[in-house]
Image (cartoon, rainbow, N blue to C red):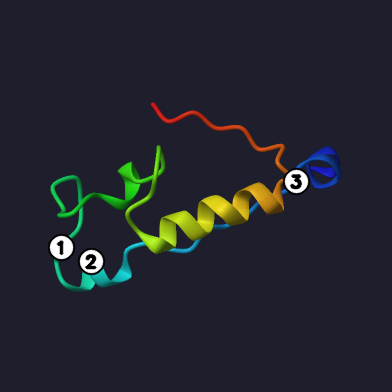
Amino acid sequence: MIWLKENVAFLTVPFMDKDGVEDGDQGKNRRPGDHNRDWDGESIYNSTEAVREFLLVWSDNKLKYEVI
């Protein structure tokens, strides 16, 4: 645990689609799109775009991810 504390940074991302869940409108068939599928290319949701931009700043552009 000491190594983890000294070498790893954790970031907790809040729940992204509260409104969709409350409205019963979430998941892979959501229109215009599922938040989980909004990470590749240009985001359609402001919340996803904001987190993507924050991750780059937070990680000092060191974070690498691949959408599969």
Q: Quadrant of residue 32?
A: bottom left
Q: Which residue is mark 3?
A: 60
For residue 63, above or below residue 18:
above
Q: Residues within 10 Å of mark 2 (few under 14, many from 20)?
A: some
For residue 25, above or below residue 52:
below
Frontmost residue, 40 versus 1: 40
Where does the image place residue 7, in percent across and percent down from the top left?
Answer: 82, 40
In this view, the mark in front (1 or 3)? 3
The reply to whether the C-beta atoms of the residues labelled 2 and 1 are less than 8 Å apart is yes
Q: How far apart are the alpha carbons under marks 2 and 1?
A: 5 Å
Q: Amino acid at mark 3?
A: Asp
The tag earlier along the polypeptide, 1 or 3, is: 1
For image coordinates 13% across by 47% down, the residue present is: 29
Where does the image place residue 14, in percent across and percent down from the top left?
Answer: 48, 63
For image coordinates 72% across by 37% down, the residue present is: 62
For residue 16, above or below residue 2:
below
Q: Which residue is mark 1?
A: 25
Where does the image place residue 26, in percent across and percent down from the top left?
Answer: 20, 58
In this view, the mark in front (2 or 3)? 3
The tag earlier along the polypeptide, 2 or 1, is: 2
The tag earlier along the polypeptide, 2 or 3, is: 2
Identify the element where label 1 is drawn: loop
Q: Which residue is mark 2?
A: 20
For image coordinates 61% across by 50% down, the residue present is: 55
For residue 3, above or below residue 49:
above
Which of the image's four quarters has the C terminus? top left
Q: How far apart are the alpha carbons under marks 2 and 3?
A: 32 Å
- Judged left or right of residue 32, residue 15 is right
